[in-house]
Amino acid sequence: MIDYEGFLSRAGARMQESAIRRMGTVLAQKQDIISFAPGYPAPETFPWYEFQEIARELLTGTDGSVLQYGPTRGFRPLLETIEIIMASRGIATSHERLLITTGSQQGLDLVARVLLDPGDVVLVELPTYTGAITAFRNVQAEMVGVQQESDGIDLTHLDEVWTRLARDNRRIRLLYVVPNFQNPTGLLIGLEKRRLLLDWASRRNLLILEDDPYRELFFEDSATEADVRPIRADDREGRVIYLSSFSKTLAPGYRVAWIDAPGPLAAKFEMAKQAEDLLTGSLDQRIVYEACRRGVLQRQLPLLRRHYRYKRDVMIEALRRGLGDDVSWPEPRGGFFLWVTLPPAIDADRMIPRAVGHGVIYVAGEAFFVNGTGGTNIVRLSFSAPSPDRIRAGATRLALTVRGELDALRARGKTAAAPARPVQS
């Protein structure tokens, strides 16, 4: 047998499978399992009829460019539409600043490859999105975590971390944040804190990478358009690189997202994208453009907000019924996730086999921490994809799992808090 490990680059050797994607393997092995693991949009919300009509018209063969190569920057009418979308978010942009990407994940990868050298430091929230962890790890950057408060990133701790790293002569390149309904916690950075964050980045001469896929999914009982104003909207210096996507509002299968960045950086991201995939799929871009042009996207947004708000409420009610005050979470005002703290004795990662046995799965909180510890007794539950009945059934199964785990711990005399296990960063 060939030892292929010896052929790997240093970056290749460090690559790790996504904890969320790993749950897909579990799902494939067991049929009757309710998954709260992936943050998938609900397929019943997809505008299927409109997509069918758009595709039927595009695929008549009268316009050969529909299935042809196109510019790396993206389909020009779609870029112009994104300019309008950005303006509705309070952001003035231009063609020179925009690049269509194959999902926001490619945006993270392009930023990492263009801006980060091995050993460079990226500041991230504790916890943070696993896709960003993967993108930064793949270029051998070091991620250093910053604590969060109830209204998002802790600015005092942020400056303490920066000061310590600067004192050690570390090269700090970026601050990565998900300000709107963060994945995984669901937290929303407060408006005043967003402005203070920009001021801080200016004083410390750092770039901010703002990842904003959930912005449109605010729940109107507790959040408004004003609450989700992007950090980029108040950027006057060109410090913010902004990522957003159509995956959560139209459909993720099209893989159409975008980067907004200062012109010199956007040009470099374009060059890097040329080496990856030349362009995002032409047909996908055209379908998304037509969905925007015909008003499909605008009609979707209020429906999505009501749909996911209802599912959030169903999950909260079901967890309260099954586990009472033994669990807690910050109530999300938008997005897809509940960040649930379990009793302190429980190790959520070690509990996964028991959960699978009961027919439910989640993502253990450890996967979202880069500081070597944290999240041991926390799970991320996604309420977006399952039906309300499946959410209720899954919550019941999770309650059985937690009760069974606590009983097993008591039987072994382990009722104290489970020790935190190291997490690779």
Image (spheres, rainbow, N blue to C red):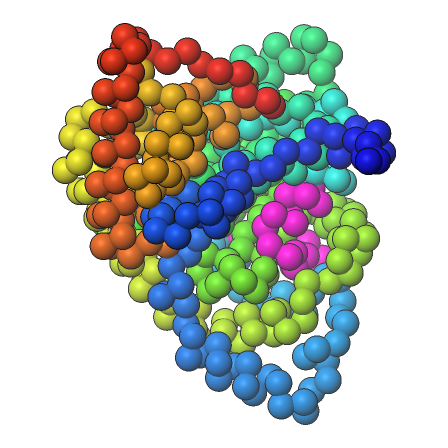
Expressed as whole percent of the image width and height from the top left, the position of residue 407 reads 23, 20
Q: Is residue 215 visible?
A: no
Please, is residue 249 above or below residue 158 in the view? below
The residue drawn where x is 65% and y is 38% is 135
Please, is residue 122 above or below residue 46 in the view? above
The residue drawn where x is 42% and y is 43% is 37
In the picture, residue 414 is in which quadrant? top left
| The magenta segment | 91-111
Tell which of 391 and 55 is nearer to you.
391
Please, is residue 395 above or below residue 72 in the view? above
Q: Is residue 268 magenta?
A: no
Expressed as whole percent of the image width and height from the top left, the position of residue 391 reads 27, 49
Expressed as whole percent of the image width and height from the top left, the position of residue 382 reads 37, 44
Q: Is residue 100 magenta?
A: yes
Q: How many marks?
A: 0
The residue drawn where x is 67% and y is 67% is 281
Please, is residue 53 above or below residue 376 in the view? below
Tell which of 181 and 379 is nearer to you.
379
97 vs 335, left or right, is right
Tell which of 43 and 193 is nearer to you.
43
Specify the quadrant that holds the N terminus: top right
Extreme residue in the front direction: 1
Q: Is residue 28 visible?
A: yes
Specify the quadrant that holds the C terminus: top right
Expressed as whole percent of the image width and height from the top left, the position of residue 160 reads 54, 13
The residue drawn where x is 26% and y is 40% is 397
